Image (spheres, rainbow, N blue to C red):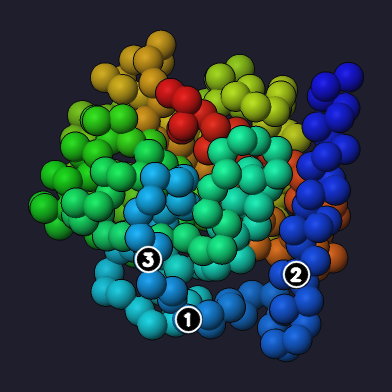
């Protein structure tokens, strides 16, 4: 009965969360694939509340741009995701915006979960690699999303600069991350927005031990956050958007509880 209740609740929340986004997009004349071109908001002052942290690689920018990969889906993707977490949990996150930090910023350690997208252009310096390695070793959790075959080699190279001894392994639906809040019993339940083939989920474990904490969650050959960004616009079905939000909720809940 509880699972049915949550399923109905998330459908309603997704519809409500998407209404404002859809209206704003219609008013601005924005179309799919064009990016928001939204101004990059100043970071919120840390106050202990959970804040969506987006990782920046490369120089800062004044406006979101599809040419700048780390900014893809900003700000709608994270705002809609935080609306969902706010409605179905007691997390009470900031929902009006995310914070953005480079990998070598000391402020990083105030945020338990970090998100990075489109790592095809990602490059880490020695100082960034050292700082982010410490972040992960001290309990930080990284979500990687929105990349595919032509990005893998660069991601693999940069990730091993951060964690030189890391083993990147494929995950299946039995891993606890797929059961940390919603029950995702098959990876076939997870929809694709535009990537051909099936989504692939990979991870890096603490000490390369699959019985220990998952440190890095890698959503490869997929773009889960695209559903978060465009929820409520009618471009995809509610069922598909719900499935993508469930994946996101599980990622964040796992990162906060492990």
Disc 3 crowd, CA 10 A, few/some/many (<14, 14-19, 20+): few
Residue 248 position within the rendered picture, expressed as x and y whole percent measured from the top left: 60, 42
Residue 230 position within the rendered picture, expressed as x and y whole percent measured from the top left: 71, 64
The answer to whether residue 46 is left or right of residue 85 is left
Placement of the N terminus among the 4 image quadrants = top right
Residue in the image at 60% along x and 24% along y: 180
Q: From mark 2 to mark 1, how far is it between C-alphas? A: 18 Å
Residue in the image at 46% along x and 45% along y: 50
- The quadrant where residue 179 appears: top right
Q: Nearer the viewer, residue 65 or 63?
A: 63
- The quadrant where residue 253 appears: top right
Q: Is residue 175 above or below residue 225?
A: above
Placement of the C terminus among the 4 image quadrants = top left
Q: Residue furthest left?
A: 126
Q: Is residue 194 above or below residue 136?
A: below
- Give the structural element (helix, strand or loop) at label 3: loop
Task: Determine which of the numbered discs, if any, sits on residue 241 in the image.
Answer: none
Q: Residue furthest top?
A: 211
- Give the structural element (helix, strand or loop) at label 1: loop
Q: Which residue is mark 1?
A: 39
Residue in the image at 65% along x and 36% along y: 89
Mark 2 in CB contact with mark 1 (< 8 angstroms): no
Q: From mark 3 to mark 1, how far is it between C-alphas? A: 12 Å
Q: Earlier in the sequence, mark 2 or mark 1?
A: 2
Q: From mark 2 to mark 3, how far is it between C-alphas? A: 22 Å
Q: Nearer the viewer, residue 90 or 227?
A: 90
Q: Which residue is mark 2?
A: 20
- The quadrant where residue 67 appears: bottom left
Residue 88 position within the rendered picture, expressed as x and y whole percent measured from the top left: 70, 38
Q: Nearer the viewer, residue 83 or 68?
A: 83
Q: Which residue is mark 3?
A: 43
Residue in the image at 31% along x and 22% along y: 206
């Amino acid at each position: 009965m509880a699972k049915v209740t949550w399923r109905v609740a998330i459908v309603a929340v997704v519809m409500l969360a998407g209404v404002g986004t859809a209206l704003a997009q219609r008013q601005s004349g924005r179309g799919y694939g064009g990016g928001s071109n939204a101004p990059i908001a100043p970071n919120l002052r840390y106050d202990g509340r959970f804040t969506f942290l987006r990782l920046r690689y490369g120089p800062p920018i004044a406006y979101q741009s599809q040419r700048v990969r780390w900014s893809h889906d900003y700000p709608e993707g994270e705002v809609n995701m935080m609306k969902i977490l706010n409605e179905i949990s007691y997390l009470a996150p900031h929902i009006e915006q995310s914070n953005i930090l480079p990998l070598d910023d000391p402020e990083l350690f105030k945020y338990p979960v970090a998100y990075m997208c489109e790592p095809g252009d990602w490059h880490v310096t020695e100082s960034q690699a050292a700082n982010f390695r410490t972040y992960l070793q001290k309990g930080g959790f990284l979500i990687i999303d929105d990349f595919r075959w032509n990005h893998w080699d660069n991601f693999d190279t940069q990730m091993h600069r951060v964690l030189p001894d890391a083993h990147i392994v494929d995950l299946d639906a039995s891993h606890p991350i797929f059961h940390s809040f919603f029950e995702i019993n098959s990876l076939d339940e997870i929809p694709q927005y535009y990537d051909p083939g099936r989504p692939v989920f990979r991870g890096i474990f603490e000490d390369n031990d699959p019985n220990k904490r998952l440190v890095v969650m890698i959503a490869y050959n997929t773009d889960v956050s695209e559903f978060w960004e465009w929820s409520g616009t009618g471009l995809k079905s509610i069922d598909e958007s719900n499935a993508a939000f469930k994946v996101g909720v599980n990622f964040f809940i796992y990162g906060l509880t492990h």
